[in-house]
Amino acid sequence: MSSNYISGAEIVIRCLHEEKVKFVFGYPGGAVLNIYDAVFQQNKFKHILVRHEQAAVHAADGYSRSTGKVGVALVTSGPGATNAVTGIATAYMDSIPLVIISGQVPTFAIGQDAFQECDTVGITRPCVKHNFLVKDIKDIASTMKKAFYVASSGRPGPVLVDIPKDITAEKCDFSYPKSIHLRSYNPIIKGHSGQIKKALSLLLNAKRPMVYSGGGVVLGNASAQLTKFVRAIGYPVTSTLMGLGGFPASDKQFLGMLGMHGTYEANMAMQECDVLLAVGARFDDRVIGNPEHFLSKPKTIIHIDIDPSSISKRVKIDIPIVGDVISVLIELNDLLSKEKTKQNASRKDWFKDINQWRSMNCLNFKNDKKLIKPQFVIQSLYKVTKGDAFITSDVGQHQMWAAQYYPFNKPRRWINSGGLGTMGVGLPYAMGAQLAFPDEKIACVTGEASIQMCIQELSTCKQFHLPIKIINLNNRYMGMVRQWQEFFYENRYAESYMDALPDFVKLAESYGHIGMKIEKPSDVEPALKEAFSQKLKERLVFMDFITDQKENVFPMIPNGKGLSEMITAEEL
Amino acid sequence: MRHIISLLMENESGALSRVSGLFSARGYNIESLTVAPTEDATLSRMTIVTSGSDEIIEQIIKQLNKLIDVVKVLDLNDGRFIERELMIVKVKANAQYRDEMKRMCDIFRGRIIDVSDNSFTIEITGSSSKLDAYIESIDKAAILETVRTGASGIGRGERILKV
Ligand SMILES: Cc1ncc(C[n+]2csc(CCOP(=O)(O)OP(=O)(O)O)c2C)c(N)n1
């Protein structure tokens, strides 16, 4: 048996074992050499060597988003830590539970501008749920325990543990705390029963009821409870970008995504409803646009959220319910099952309105014989993967098209950066998801600009045999930027043209993968079929789709406008 | 409206910067902030004077509560409370000002704590507005230096902030 008088580095590793960590995404360097030496001498988790620390955090994040478990990244001091910051901020904005371990210069060198020293705790403070600088080897185990607990409880988020090198070399007795209590941190789990009763009665008496579901439903593993509730009560439901998959998109009660690029019916119903149930969503600017415009149509708002500070932040809430969404939904479902009459005849008009909005068919687009329409690629991807793949995306038009044209019926299948909107996440997210689910189909929908922000990870994919399918919607533009320039800057396409692009086929091949270039609409489906075929099951395929350069994402709510002020494809 | 918020937090290094960082990151006003350990050495008590609409104050309280190191938050303005601030002022006390400065100090119940040929150093405590009033009342030309601690506050009677 291994002794318990061990080095700080070994303690870090033993803590990760205690937390049953399967993968650590990382990159070595001076300050973490002791920890890496301990990584070398264990085999309980697999270390995934990325090619840039940003990708280490994104991959850990993708692993967490796809599994619900805490993702773990390990980086060195100074540049290792600063490279990780984008990944940490991305996870923070979307409330993803991560533990990031960063090396730090030895305690005696802190503050002396030592080689590769930076104030990691200071730099990351505004973009972590919490962080720690461990100053004593005796504190490593309890700090790691706290880090995992804080990251994964309440409203989840990234927690960073900064460990000076000298501490990882010292030795002390190791024991991992079984449980931890923080007097200053007690997340509220159970919602207030009185409020829940009030909420249900308001909902049952609504004339134009609406359910608005967010990323909290996915993160809180509450999608089965939400689905049960929405189906039982029979109301229309919409979802934010982060909540997609929380309610089955192919269900007829689902109105599609709402927000800046939401469907006409979802945005109109959100605007016109009289009682709104918001579940694990936060009324952000990309979702409701201008809050004053949103409230210009009076409505009673019920808001279920684990984070009290999410409530009444942008929009005044009438019935706040602070609690874990799943526990509140269970209570709502119990109460609802005891109700006798559920359907209210006066709601007929509401459903008539909704059907009217729906009949606009706002996601309709004109397919083309010569040019590949990006929407068509996503529809074909849906068809070929039978709607059952994990889809990661980068940031831009392709992200919106993936969200609009790939209906998600299960939670945790749609993985993207919603809050921070970080280009470059797509490939590392796919790596994390593919490692977690080696037998599942993982597709990364990206653009020729975004993919180049973490392109180096093609090497990681080769080393670890990750058979990701990359769907590059190559419009030779930073499409989303170009779209805004077209609409709001009179077609002055300042620096949004992607010049000097690499030959992606050769690029993929040089990393040892398969590259395909698809230029004709008629080749789209056959190419996808081939990429997802049994023959290429073990291979990463980089599919470079040369798409229509000037396609735009519709509907669109211009920045700062209201939900009912959409521009639709028809109008232009 | 002006609010005085009291909070107890873990006496950890970096705790203060979490609070001040929160205020700057979210664009909240901060008029003054004071902090010191309490009789329980593991806890610090902080008093923050801020201002904002009811909605903003509500958010400030929630955001403070969200900080992992923060144990308890109390908006003193939710009930009756006492506010005190200490100011030390050095004023001219030459022949022209000497009597006047002594008189104003007495009126505001200050204490002269250091004397030189040409100056008095005066200590005054009270609510921040009382200290403002003192500054308003004396001749600006007589002020050599001022230092203020920022407000501290405590609830009246049974209102107690404790873990
Ligand atoms: C790291 C980062 N830098 C800049 C942006 C701003 N931005 C948003 S979308 C976009 C263009 C993305 O282009 P591409 O990846 O080709 O996708 P497309 O919009 O063409 O589908 C840019 C530059 C961002 N979101 N992230």
Image: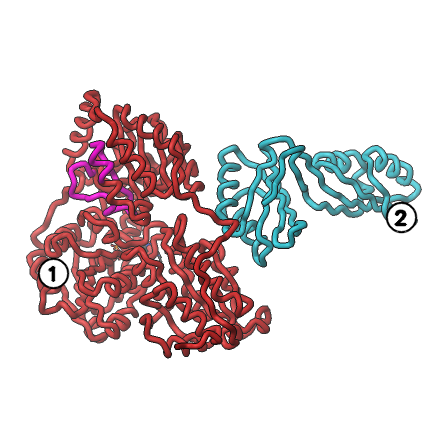
Chain colours: A red, B cyan
Where does the magenta region start and end? Answer: A228-254
Instruction: Check residue B115 in the rendering and tell me which mark sits there, or answer none.
Output: 2
Ligand 1 lies under 8 Å from the Cβ of mark 2: no
Which quadrant of the figure has residue A319? Answer: top left
Instruction: Check residue A363 in the rendering and tell me which mark sits there, or answer none.
Output: none
The crowd level at tag 2 (other Cα within 10 Å; few <14, some 14-19, many 20+) is: few
Image quarter in which the N terminus of chain B is found: top right
Say which residue appears at 79% left-offset and 34% top-offset: B137
Q: Position of residue A155 (x, y in %)?
A: 40, 48
Q: Chain of mark 2?
A: B
The crowd level at tag 1 (other Cα within 10 Å; few <14, some 14-19, many 20+) is: many
Could you say whether the residue bearing mark 2 is in a helix, strand or loop?
strand
Image quarter in which the C terminus of chain B is found: top right
- Residue identified by numbered label 1: A528
Three-letter code for the amino acid on which mark 2 is drawn: Val
Residue B122 shows up from this direction:
yes
Three-letter code for the amino acid on which mark 1 is drawn: Leu
Q: Position of residue B22 (x, y in %)?
A: 52, 49
Q: Position of residue A111 (x, y in %)?
A: 59, 68
